[in-house]
Amino acid sequence: MASAAKSLVQTLRRYMKKPWEITGPCADPEYRLAVPKATEYRVFCPATVPEKAIIPTSLPDTVYDIKYYSRDQRRNRPPIKRTVLKKADVEKMMKEKTFDTSDFPRPYLTAKVVEDDNAIGGGYQK
């Protein structure tokens, strides 16, 4: 009984089509469904590849690194160094004499600049 019903359903499926298979691109005999079957989807397991991959080898110095983080300048900065000064350290620094006036170079200009006092209107023409 079950096999007779099954064969009847299969016979009806041959003659009855889905509404979108009657007209449109699906009705074309060359139309192929975009979704692959389970047997076509993954022919071999990814862990057992039939061919071994060919990896190009070169000197590491001549290969350009495409990773972003190795070229990111924000990550290449040296770490910020912070020093915590205690009161004793500050007092010690204040007592030390770190420089003298003779340590600085003498200024080049030693002569006094004399301005012209006779300029009319302070140098501006009226």
Image (cartoon, rainbow, N blue to C red):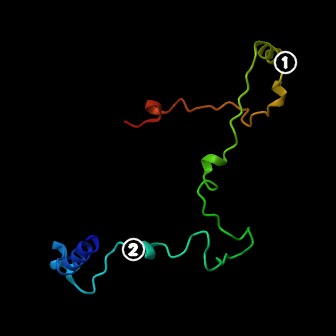
Q: CA distance from mark 1 to mark 2?
A: 85 Å
Quarter assignment of residue 13 = bottom left
Question: Amino acid type of disc 1?
Answer: Glu
Residue 59 at x, y = what percent? 75, 72
User: Is the C terminus in the top left, top right, bottom left or bottom right quadrant?
Assistant: top left
Which label number is shown at residue 51?
Answer: none
Residue 76 versus residue 116: which sits nearer the camera?
76
Residue at 61% x, 53% y is 69
**10 Å neighbourhood of mark 2: few (<14), some, or many (≥20)?**
few
Residue at 25% x, 71% y is 1
Residue annotated with mark 2: 37
First in residue order: circle 1 vs circle 2: 2
Residue 123 versus residue 38 in the image, above or below? above
What residue occupies the far front of the structure in this picture?
Answer: 1
Q: Secondary structure at mark 2?
A: loop
Apparent side of residue 67 relative to residue 94 in the rendered image (left or right): left
Residue 85 at x, y = what percent? 74, 20
Residue 116 versus residue 31 in the image, above or below? above
Which label number is shown at residue 96?
Answer: 1
Residue 92 at x, y = what percent? 82, 15
Apparent side of residue 7 relative to residue 48 in the rendered image (left or right): left
Residue 114 versus residue 8: which sits nearer the camera?
8
**10 Å neighbourhood of mark 1: few (<14), some, or many (≥20)?**
few
Apparent side of residue 71 relative to residue 13 in the rendered image (left or right): right
Residue 44 versus residue 72 in the image, above or below? below
Residue 48 at x, y = what percent? 62, 73
Question: Amino acid type of disc 2?
Answer: Lys
